[in-house]
Amino acid sequence: MQKFEKIGAFGLTEPEVGSGAAGGLTVTCKKTEEGWILNGQKKWIGNATFADLVIIWARDLDSGEVKGFIVEKDNPGYSVEKIKGKMALRIVQNGLITLKDCLVAEENRLQNANSFKDTGKVLRMTRAGVAWMATGCARGAYESALAYTRTREQFGKPIASFQMIQGHLVEMLSNLTAMQTMVFRLSEMQDEGILKDEHASLAKVFCTLRTRDIVSRAREVMGGNGILLEYDVARFVADAEAIYSYEGTKEINSLIVGRSITGFSAFI
Ligand SMILES: Cc1cc2nc3c(=O)[nH]c(=O)nc-3n(C[C@H](O)[C@H](O)[C@H](O)COP(=O)(O)OP(=O)(O)OC[C@H]3O[C@@H](n4cnc5c(N)ncnc54)[C@H](O)[C@@H]3O)c2cc1C
């Protein structure tokens, strides 16, 4: 996978279990003499339609703990359906995976993943990545909007020369600068090996919230053209919605940060 010779996917979310994955996974695994039997469904899994392998997170029927499995695409009992009708991140294919008495060998079980805490280690890294993704989306929207306002004329002048348009641009740049600074520090902490769950969650919440605000202002200063795909900003507006909700919603990541700063878990 590191060499891009194989494409992988991460299968945690289920049709009925999203935010509550920590305690609520319904996909099961059961140890038998031949290996592990997996049953259930996973929803929203990015790349799943063409991935060579998918990491499936399942609850052990015997111990109750969450375990991870490498499931290969031609594994009997494994099938994927493409999720249609997405209005955001259309470049990414998301799949609905069905596991029906899917037999997986013991050597395909992730040997160091023995509870949801180990799944959480992956989420810490991917949430940091999503904070960066939001920053890129916001920057794209800001740059497109700035370029547009400098050339678009109304009342005989570039709209960038109007005070209220400049107000929007400055708000966008302020938030963007804060986001860039935050994700840069996040990566430094990753390199130093001191990144914790709450740091990644804080950045994910902040950057995706600010991105929503930035793309909305970018769309606004472009008037009607802001909703046309040819100007890019409309695509950023749509993508910001998906980025805002995946890898843990604002609420779930806020609860992670809230638990860390107060010492009280408000998860129910
Ligand atoms: C484009 C896209 C790509 C994705 N890719 C993947 C992937 O590759 N692999 C994967 O495993 N998953 C993937 N997901 C799933 C994603 O992680 C979930 O959508 C996300 O965790 C939210 O779960 P949900 O959609 O079931 O919403 P729900 O959990 O049903 O939440 C609905 C609303 O209720 C709120 N809520 C839930 N619980 C609480 C609470 N305790 N307190 C307050 N509010 C609460 C949520 O914040 C949200 O606003 C993807 C999703 C999308 C949209």
Image: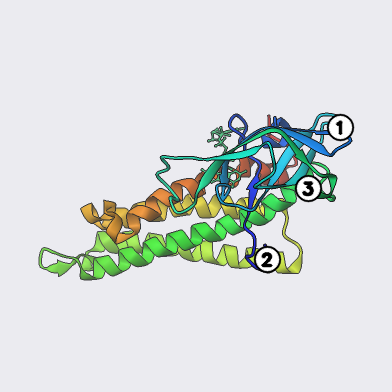
Depth check: 263 or 129 in front? 129
Q: Which mark is residue 63?
A: 1
Identify the residue at horizontal 62%, vertical 65% (top origin). Answer: 4
- On-image quarter of the N terminus: bottom right
The answer to whether 156 appears left or right of 62 in the picture is left
Residue type at the position of mark 2? Gln
- Name above or below for residue 136 compared with residue 28: below
Residue 250: x and y in percent read 55, 43
Res. 58 visible in picture: yes
Q: Which mark is residue 2?
A: 2
Residue 183: x and y in percent read 58, 63
Q: Element at badge 3?
A: helix
Residue 222: x and y in percent read 25, 58
Q: Which mark is residue 177?
A: none
Give the mark toward the camera: 3 or 2.
Answer: 2
Q: Which mark is residue 118?
A: 3
Distance (Cα) linking label 2 and label 1: 32 Å
Q: Element at badge 2?
A: loop
